[in-house]
Amino acid sequence: MHGNLEQAMEAMLHAIALQHAGALPAALETLDQAIALSPELLPARVMRSEVLAALGRFIEAVDTLDDCQRRMPDPDALKEQRQALLAQALADDLVPGHDPQALLERAYLQLLAGLPQDALGNLQSLLAVQPDHASALNNAGNALFALWRTDEAIAHYERALALRPEDAEIRFNLGNALQRAGRLSEAEACYQQVLSERAEFAEAQMELAHCALRQGHWRSGWQAMEARWRTRRLQHRLPPGDAPAWRGEPLAGKTILLWAEQGFGDNLQFVRFARPLLDAGADVIVLAPPALQRLLGTLDARIRVISAEAPLPAHDVHCPMMSLPYLLGIADESAFGRAPYLHADAADVARWQTQLGERQRPRIGLIWAGRQNQINPGRDIPLHALRGLLTPARQIDWISLQAELPPDDLAVLSELPTLQLCAEGFRDFADTAALMQCLDLVISVDSAAAHLAGALGRPCWVLLRKSGEWRWQQARSDSPWYGAMRLFRQPHEGDWPALLAQLEDALEAEFGLA
């Protein structure tokens, strides 16, 4: 292996010389040789993306960069480079505007750049000339799906599939749109057909898991979720350390390392399943993101919580946190346990009480947007849409629990004198937890803060898009995960005004506030 790396480095240095000499095809061929010798030589993959871009092969360049990013521990490491590459690809003088293939490629790049409306315009131009262009129909479906025009997306996928019934990618896309529309049996049929033709299609297996979990089919859902390690997104994700994975064998007398694999909310939701491991006789170590370390330390004094940035202690086996329900055989929501299972620090609570002063009227915490490195227009509510809710006439002290403020909302803050900002007091999630203890209610979009309030046992109302995530299931207004939580759902996709009207009625009923 060491020899392969040396040969790969030599090949990469030769590719650099070829690139500087303008011999781009030869440089690309040499980089491919380097990557074949050492697949994890990530600088070679980054350079390959640069050479492809210089050759005008922008779709391959972005795909190469995305593949490299999936192999890196920092999900944002190549974010700026990717944005620059897409900006270069979409420069007006680089792509002819009327050639059908150029329109299709430009639209695909616009989708990669997060510009679905622009992509849809180009695809509609292409479809006006070639209405039976299956790839254009499929990508138009992708654009409409990104724009939350789900029914139109379904229609485009169905037309594309009628033209190319053997295309598993189109059928998978149709399944995703049907799932969002709540047509779960039809979605499941799509995924099952995809898997009958391409058994290795891990993303289809994952979506079958989501359909099962939405319906409370816990055991089969958790089992199917294990396919996530074969998806493009996670297949290169390596566990910490060299210990073997826990596969459900007895743990008495062993030390198990639990590690956080995905977002903050997932960690807050699934860390509850560490406790049964203690009952099985294990010593439990939780490897936590620094922002969660202090808070997760309140789960159980017998559990050692260390920062993901710290050296790994000795352990016998490891397990990603979201695999615990499957390995523990969780088949019923009664086994989820009850909140609170995390707790705020008393000194931190006292600090916030002092800062907030004497309570004069109801205090309600508000989160209207999630993390800003994962901007999600279907999840987040624009702050200006909340003006009616935050009116001074409502006699509520509104406390912002946003750690990050969406840039577009900064200009609106001056119009909302009732909203108190507290982000400067948030060092980590433990600080946010302490502030939540001082509030009568937390109102949140689908965010890590909602999971935090739930884990603390605080009253929390969650504002969901019509097709909320699998963990909120279908149609129910309560949550199997958190006993003090109430769910509000859009009656129609994107209809925040109707949901906010429901919310105002609920506030009046709860607090007697008009």
Image (cartoon, rainbow, N blue to C red):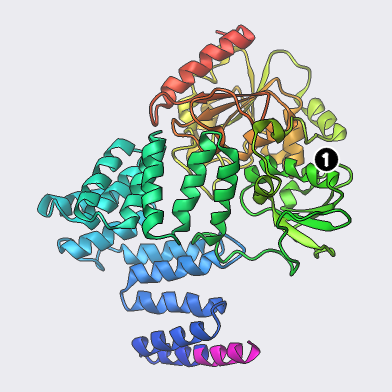
Nearest to the observer: residue 159 or residue 327: 327
Q: Where is residue 277 in the image (x, y as percent from the top left)?
A: 80, 47
Name which residue type carries label 1. Thr
28 lies above or below 427: below
> Residue 364: which quarter of the image?
top right
Can residue 407 be seen at all in this image of the molecule? no
Q: Which residue is drawn at 41% across and 91% down?
A: 18
Q: Where is residue 491 in the image (x, y as percent from the top left)?
A: 41, 23
* Residue range of the region highlighted in magenta in the rendering: 1-11
Is residue 454 on the magenta stretch? no
> Residue 84: which quarter of the image?
bottom left
Q: In which quarter of the image is the N terminus?
A: bottom right
Q: Quadrant of the C terminus?
A: top right
Q: Main secondary structure of the magenta part?
A: helix
Q: Is residue 74 left or right of residue 152?
A: right
Q: Where is residue 47 in the image (x, y as percent from the top left)?
A: 47, 79
Q: In this view, does 247 lie to the left or right of 384?
A: right
Q: Residue at x 25, y 51 (%)?
A: 161
Q: Position of residue 181 (x, y in %)?
A: 38, 35
88 lies above or below 499: below
| Helix, strand or loop at mark 1 | loop
Q: Mark 1 points at which residue?
A: 298
Q: Is residue 320 left or right of residue 446?
A: right
> Residue 403: which quarter of the image?
top right
Nearest to the observer: residue 86 or residue 294: 294
Can residue 150 be seen at all in this image of the molecule? yes
Q: Residue at x 69, y 30 (%)?
A: 334
Q: How many labels does the image show?
A: 1
Q: Crowding at label 1, few (<14), some or many (≥20) Cα neighbours within 10 Å?
A: some
Q: Residue at x 46, y 17 (%)?
A: 501
